[in-house]
Structures are given as structure tokens and as C-alpha cells.
Image (cartoon, helix red, strand yellow):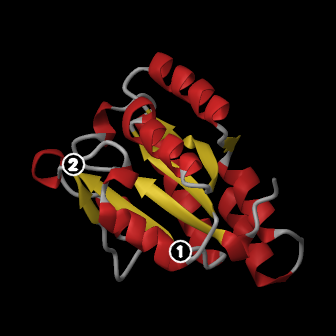
Amino acid sequence: MRINAEHTAALIIDVQERLLPAMSENGQLLANTIKLLKGLQILEIPSVFTQQYTRGLGDTVAEVKGLYSDFEFTEKTTFSCCGEPAVDVKLNQLGKNTVIVAGIESHVCVLQTVTDLVDLGFEVVVAVDCIASRHPFDKKYALKRMMKEGATLSTTESILFELLGKAGGDKFKAISALVK
């Protein structure tokens, strides 16, 4: 399966103030997530954001929210984003069949969402360098399960260049500068 920009949206799961600091390699996770989001903006790929139980886990981190003048999120208490009808509505309104997934935690909300998205017929691409768990062991086995369930695993740089599709032009220059 090739990732095609015209048919792709992103789902960014629970990158929140009280969750992010507890994640393994959280600094690299945040840097990669910001790189992915900036690249998706350059390529005009829409992104949907969720927050798990905001009152307890805080808002989406400022570094992510600050990338968007019109940042909005969907509140959820279900682990799978697909358990929240408002997320399903947003994804369906976008009319895309491929969803790039990033966020936390790998073995809980991300895994359950990925499984449900695959079951709903979406092509799912997991940005493996943009997901994390508190313990690397949990992420390792969540990735194995996601792959078994039918998700495609990839990295930020690979995803962005695949969405771009060709060298040349302003978008190529912007993506090239972003990944350096």
C-alpha cells in the first residue's frame, strides 16, 4: 500500500501535559511528533486531535497546540478513539481512507484505536517514532500486535516523503529542510 496525500488524514492521540512526561524517550517523541505535524501542514493533510480525560490528564501540550491557530480537540474517555462518536464523525467528514496515527500510549489508546480503524476499513499507518509508552517493552509488543492486525508501520521521514511523492518544488524544499 502506498500512502497518497489526497486520501490521507492524521489522528493524533492524547499528547497531553500529564501523559507526555511519563513516556519513555518523551523528548524525542515530542520532537518527532512536531516534525510530523509540521510536515502534514506543509502537505495540507488534515489532523484530528484527541484528549483523554482532560480534567485529569491536562491539555494537549503547548508545543503541539501552538502549531495551529485554530487548534481543536475531541474529548474522550474511551481508550479507543473510535469509541468516541465525535471522532468517528470527524474522520468520516474528511472522507479519507488512510489514517496516519501518532500519540500515546502505544499499548492502550493507540493500539485499541489502530485495531478499530483497521476493522472499520481504514488503511492505517502508524508513525512508530511518534508513539510511546511508559515502558519500551509495552511499545514493542503493541507494535507487533498492530502489524498483526493489519496496520502499516513507518517513520516520520518516510511518511512525509511518501506523501510528497516527488522531488522539486516548494513543498519538497520545506519537507527537506524540516527533516534535516
Residue that carries the numbered disc 1 in the rendered image: 46
Sooner in the amino-acid sequence: mark 1 or mark 2: 1
State the SS at label 1: loop
Q: Which of the 4 quarters of the picture holds residue 105?
A: top left
Residue that carries the numbered disc 2 in the rendered image: 77
Q: Which of the 4 quarters of the picture holds residue 123?
A: bottom right
Where 9 sits versus 51, above or below?
below
Q: What residue lies at 37% left-to-right and 45% top-to-bottom?
A: 80
Residue 71 lies, in percent from the top left, at 34, 75
Q: Nearer the viewer, residue 121 or 132?
A: 121
Q: Could you tell me which quadrant the C terminus lies in?
A: bottom right
Residue 67 lies, in percent from the top left, at 42, 71
Residue 147 lies, in percent from the top left, at 66, 33
Q: Residue furthest left?
A: 55
Kind of residue at badge 2: Thr
Q: What residue lies at 46% left-to-right and 21% top-to-bottom?
A: 138
Camera sees residue 124? yes
Q: Is residue 128 left or right of residue 91?
A: right
Judge the density around disc 2: few (<14), some (14-19), many (≥20) Cα neighbours within 10 Å.
few
Where 5 sits versus 106, above or below?
below
Q: Residue furthest front?
A: 120
Number of marks in picture: 2
Judge the density around disc 1: few (<14), some (14-19), many (≥20) Cα neighbours within 10 Å.
some
Q: Which of the 4 quarters of the picture holds residue 8?
A: bottom right
Kind of residue at badge 1: Pro
Q: Nearer the viewer, residue 134 or 146?
A: 146
Looking at the rendered image, the disc whose residue lies closer to the viewer, 1 or 2, is: 2
Q: Is residue 130 left or right of residue 83?
A: right
